[in-house]
Structures are given as C-alpha cells and as structure tokens.
Amino acid sequence: MSILVNKRTRLVVQGITGGEGTFHTSQMLAYGTNVVAGVTPGKGGIKYKGNEKDHFNRAVPVYDTVADAVQHEGADTSIIYVPAGFAGDAIMEAADAGIKLVVCITEGIPVKDMVNVYEYISKKGVRLIGPNCPGIITPGEAKVGIMPAFIHKPGRIGVISRSGTLTYESVWQLTERGIGQSTCIGIGGDPIIGTRFIDAIKLFNEDDKTDGVIMIGEIGGSAEEEAAEYIKKNVSKPVVGFIAGRTAPPGRRMGHAGAIISGGKGTAKEKMDAMRAAGIRVVESPALMGETMKQSLAKKYKAKYTIKAKKKSVSKKKSTAKKSNRKKKSTPKKKR
Amino acid sequence: MKIHEYQGKDILRKYGVAVPRGEVAFTVDQAVDGAKKLGGSVWVVKAQIHAGGRGKGGGVKVAKSIDEVKQYAKQILGMTLITHQTGPEGRLVKRLLIEEGANIDKEMYVGITLDRVKSRNVVMVSTEGGMEIEKVAEEHPERIVKEHIDPAVGFQQFQARKLAFALGLSSGDVYKNAVKFLMALYRAYEATDASLFEINPLVITKEGNVIALDAKVNFDDNSLYRHPEFAELRDTDEEEPLEIEASKSNLNYIKLDGNVGCMVNGAGLAMATMDIIKLAGGEPANFLDVGGGANAQTVENGFKIILADHHVKAILINIFGGIVRCDRVANGVVEAAKKVHVNVPIVIRLAGTNADIAADILKNSGMSFLVAENLKDAAEKVTKALAA
C-alpha cells in the first residue's frame, strides 16, 4: 500500500558518516527501513555503527562510491545528506550508478547546479525527490527522510507537500482522526525539484491502495496549477488542498527558495482558484486539512466501499484475508 | 541578493556587455565631479535604490548642463523615492549614478531568468522596451520571444541571431552588435550565478549601438559562497534593520505590517501560521522560521526581534516538534519569556514529540501563556487575545 518506497526498498545513504547522515540513518534503521549501505568517499570498507551520540541498531557497510553500493548490496534507492556545494554531484553520482529513486534532503543547492542535475537525471530516467525536502515515508514499511516517524499511521491517504513541518501538521491531523497514510512525500521547496505535484498525483491516482490525496502547496511557481489541470481530467479520488502564503507579500522569498510571488504570478489566490476549478476541496485554514479529508472520505467511501465489496467477490487478484483486514481497519475511520 | 544598477553595470562591463559610461556619487560634489569626468553635454542623474519604477517616481533626470547635474543631484539625494515597488513608505536615496546621455533610437527589453516550468534558463526579448514585462506578457504575449538554454551546451549563436531577428535588428552593425550583446549578457549571467538579469530598456542608439540603459541584476543566494567578491556589493541600507538583526542570530525573519507576531519552525508552517492569524482577524507582523533547533536562545532572540516591532499586540508560537522535542521548546519559551519582558499575550501551540509534558511545563510556569490544543484552537485564542 504505497508508492515509490516500501519494505523491499534497498536504501543507500550518501553522506552516512556526517552528523546529519548518522543521526537520520539511526532513525531510519530504528523505523525498520532497509538500509543496505552507506557512501562516504574515502571511508569505504568500514562497517558503520554510528557515532558516540547516535548509535545504529546494526552495522551498515560503507563504500567509496554509489556504484560500489549498487554492485555489492543491490542498492536501488538513495538518500542524500551531503552539504549543498556537493549535493548536485551526489545526485548525479547516484543516477550514474543506476539508482532509480534519489531522495535529496539538502537545502541550499545553487540553482545553476540544479539546472544541470535536472538535465542529467532526465536523460537517465531517474526519479528525484527534492532537494530541500523532508523525504518520503510509507508508514509501517520504509522511512526515507527526516520526518518524525511516530506521527504517521499506515493507511490509504497520500500526502504531497512542498513543505516539511506543514506536511507533519497535515499527517498529524489525519492520524489524530484515525486516518492512516499510504505514502507521504515532501517534494521540496526549491524552484527546481525532481518530482512535482503532477508526478506524485499521477502515482497516487494509479495506486489502488490510495483512496484520497492531500496536496499542500505554497506561493511561487505554477506547479499547483499544472497538477490541478491533470486532476480535473484524470482524478476521481478525493483531493483536499491547501496553499500556504495567502498573507505573504509579493517579491519576498518566504523561507523556501521557491516561495516567492514574482511579477504578480504565483499567488495563493491563483492557485486556490485553479485547484477549486479542478474539483479539489481547498481549505482556507490549514487547521481543517484533516477534518476536510475525513468528510470527503465519508462522502466518497459510502458509495465506493459498496462498489468495492462487489468488486472483491469478482476480483481474485489479491488475498481476501488482506482485503477484509484492510476493510476492518478502515471501517472505524468513517465512524470516528 | 539584489544589487544597485551601477554595480550591475560594472559587472556587465567586465563581461563585454555594452553599457553607458557612468560614475557613482554619494554626494552632490561627487555627482558634479563625475559629470565633468564623463564630459559631453548631456548627463542622466539616476537614483540608486533596490526598486524599479524610479523614473516615474522622479528619481531619474536628464541634465543638459553641469549646473543642472548639481541641481538634480541635490534634489534626488536624500529624497524619499516612492515607486510601485517600494511601498507607500518609499526608500531614502543615498547614492546616485551619473551617466553619459545616449542617443536613443529604439527601446527594447531583454531578460534572463530561470523558467521553473522547464527547469531551464530562458532568454526573453521584447520590442516593448520600458514597459513592465509582466504587463506585456499579459496584454501582448506574442511580443515576447523566448529561447530556452540547453544546459549541456549553453546559449548558442543561432539563438542570439533568432532573438536579434525577432527584435527586427536584422542587418548591418546593429545586428552584429545585438548578437554580440546577447552572447556577452548570457556569459555574464552564467559566470555570476545570477538568478535574474533584466535590461529594460535595452537601447538601440542612432549610431547603431546596442546598450544596456538600465540593469537589474539579482544573484542566487545559494551560490554566494562561490562569489566572496559580491559580499561588498551588499547595501544594508536597502534592508530592513530588524531583518539584518535576525539574520545575525540565524533567524529567517521578514518584517510585515501586521499586529500579531509569530514564531514557527519550518517555512511552510510559518506561512500557514500567518494565514491563520489573518483568518483569526489579525494581521501577521512577520514571517519567522526558527528552523530545526528551537532552543531557549533562538526563542529569546525571536522574542526580541518580534517585540522590537511596536505594532505587535500578540504573539503566536507554533512549533511542530518532530526531531525537536516540545518539552525542550517549552522550557526554552519559559526561560526566554522570563528574560525578555514580554508585555503582550502569548498564544502557544506545541504539537508532536512530548507535547503533553510541554503543556504541563507551560501551565505550571506561573506565566500567563495561552496554551492552544491545536491549530484551530490557536486561531481562536489569537482572536480572543486581540479582542481583550
């Protein structure tokens, strides 16, 4: 029940021996993420168990290059915790080594580097999440990022957001209401990012384990409008949206490099209007994201679950045990 | 990072972009000396502030004699220039650019920036010089011609030719000069890690020269570490004093005009918190992202910055504790509030790791914090605090 990462993910951590890399690897390991290797150039050959502050629950083999980690450990996904000046290079190294999904946490990568990186990975057919993002988590299966694990709960709602803590806020609102998440992706706050709303929406739309999506945008750019256009034409799952920065003044960067209204474009109002026109339930207050999703699900679920029940008897693709189990899990959601 | 026009032109000149000769002046005497040094019979006296629309606001004057240079320099230096980009409070003019006059035949536009949709740089030209490009884009999008840059090979001659032809600069010296200008301009953009070049107007002189009559140059903040030489171009007079103060404490602060201060971790949540304040009937007084490590020191610095703005009638602290534990934040808030005399109501909402312990700490602190259960409750408490 997920997109992009799951129990089978074989993760390599680039920059594993650094402070950030060590701390977050310890957290990812504790969550049960399948971390198969680390990379720190010059430290290849050691088995790393963390530092005096942060201990790993098991040793992770460290390699000099991502290519080595792929060859020896079969790594297929990478997470990057290297400083901004070297992060673009790290993304390209992962892409060159045959990694298919690269998650870059690093904030502050020069735009010029990212123009080149974007071109490079597009040619290689590699998916990048971020940079300047909290990462991606499939609750109960794999945490590939820096998000606090405990706020999540396995379930059937996808979350996509340009922000970190605002993602946590929405996830927490869902979890508090007993609504679990299929996968949560922080796509990042930079002007150039690898995976945009539209890409993530497509994946969630095609994922039969995702029943609805929360989409959290912010001022700047036009990625929300682009996604709204797609949703209008292709998505029937309930989508709840919020755009941060209605009160942000034009011409000022609001923390994120990409959060800026320039030339009167990229305002929250434009985005909210486009999203509403696409049938997305846009909330005015970020306090209402979870509640609105709950209502949307209740409305949709009634009809949908009856249809599903019928489908179940017809389709023999998946085990009935699993399905009924899931159904049991989701029933109280509606009532709570 | 924004720089002044004269600084931008100095940089362009280095890369072979044609710009008028000019002299910077901080005093009237320097303006007169500069004009004499330039020679000729026509000079332009230009206010140097980090905002557009200076001409309309009275910050750009053409002088026909040295006496007029003096007169205009006196008039503009020290004036508060109000343009559509400065806001109603305007900007105090402390620097001038004295430039040789140009024999203008046509005014056009060229800009270079990142196209976020394509994740590539784009060079844009338009025959509509002197107008705001956003307006042209809205009213006559067909008059803007774009060339996207393939990062693998960079800006190519044929692209410069296409743009020159699109501007109607199709033969003779003016065509050659236009291609040369565009090539040099892109070279400068790449070399300086710029995020925006705007030459408006780009001028075609009666002699067939192609020159940058104005230059708006912004650099990518993330790349500044590669360009230590740009540090001296920073003009702190153009920045909000409180923002400079905040940046010293590593706080990401932007001053706004409202009455409710806020302190939040994370940029997205900070913007969302501002939106909540508005919904609660207040106006956000600032954007403040304290980042991942919200400890007593950062909270104390945050309080000081927020309270330095006397319009603040209440403060909303909104922290989502993930990696950072709420009980630590709560202790930090209590400690900081004791140190800094806070005379406005403080609404606190702490969620996430150890939020329960944090709530107890705040309740037992003996201070009158308004502790909110969730975002909705926080908004209501802000409304109440403002009404009181």
Image (spheres, coloured by chain):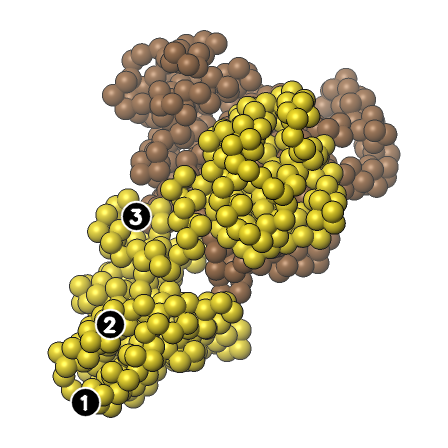
Q: Which chain is brown?
A: A
Residue linked to disc 2? B27
Query: Disc 1 and disc 3: Cα gap in Å?
Result: 40 Å
Residues tagged by mark 2 and mark 1 found on one chain of the structure: yes
Contact? badges 2 and 1 (CB < 8 Å):
no
Q: Return the chain for callout 1.
A: B
Q: Nearer the viewer, mark 1 or mark 3?
A: 1
Nearest to N terminus: mark 2 or mark 1: 2
- Label at residue B41: 1
Left or right of B179, for residue A48: right
- Of B376 and A219, nearer the camera is B376
Query: Disc 2 and disc 1: Cα gap in Å?
Result: 21 Å
Query: Residue drawn 19% across and 63% down?
Result: B15
Q: Is residue B46 visible?
A: yes
Q: Residues within 10 Å of mark 3 (few under 14, many from 20)?
A: some
Residue linked to disc 3? B224
Q: Return the chain for callout 2.
A: B
Chain B, colour shown: yellow
